[in-house]
Amino acid sequence: MILPVLFATGIPFFVIHGAEPFWDWSVKGLLLFLFLVIVGVPLHELLHALVFGIFARGGYKSVKFGIDKSTYTPYCHCTTPIRVQYYRVGALLPLLVLGAVPFVISLFTGSFGFWLYGYIYIIAAGGDLVALKMLKKIPAHRKVLDHPEKMGFYVFD
């Protein structure tokens, strides 16, 4: 995903704004950018949780957070079944909010920081896109339950 997303987002940005925004960094701007990237990690999981908590039978009590010890990857896990249509929304929300919106803002503002932030969080949504691909042929009214230990889910009738 890294190269296709780089070309899909980078080419439009650099065609519109050139390379000049790349050189327009200050130490203060760089530190703010790094802070926002770090804050984006838990925010990504909280965006999943927002949707899961609204639509899961147990509400926010059904949402669990953790970190995969083998990959140091944070995750949000819904412990009760949820309709596929809502699972899709929960999977897409971080991609849209943290990835697509900053990218679109970068096109209008010429901010390399917004472009890079959007690029990073589009890549970070890679696992979510895999889950969406797995759900592609599952009807929206069916329910899914997150697998308790692995990426993926069980499908219920």
Image (cartoon, rainbow, N blue to C red):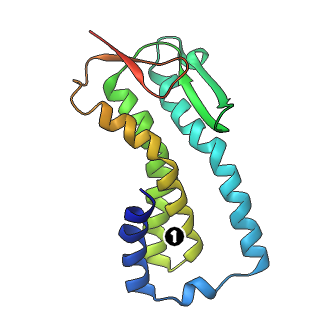
90 lies above or below 99: above
Q: Image quarter for residue 87?
A: top left
Name the residue located 48 percent from the left edge and 12 percent from the top edge.
80
Give coordinates of residue 63: x percent, y percent.
58, 21
* Amino acid under disc 1: Trp
Q: Residues within 10 Å of mark 1 (few under 14, many from 20)?
A: many
Name the residue located 45 percent from the left edge and 47 percent from the top edge.
126
Q: What quarter of the picture does the C terminus occupy? A: top left
Q: How many marks?
A: 1
Name the residue located 67 percent from the left edge and 38 percent from the top edge.
72
Name the residue located 55 percent from the left edge and 24 percent from the top edge.
77
Give coordinates of residue 8: x percent, y percent.
36, 68
Give coordinates of residue 152: x percent, y percent.
43, 26
Give whichever of 4, 143 is nearer the camera: 4
The residue singled out by tag 1 in the image is 115
Q: Image quarter for residue 136?
A: top left
Give whichever of 120, 92 is nearer the camera: 120
145 to the left or right of 143: right
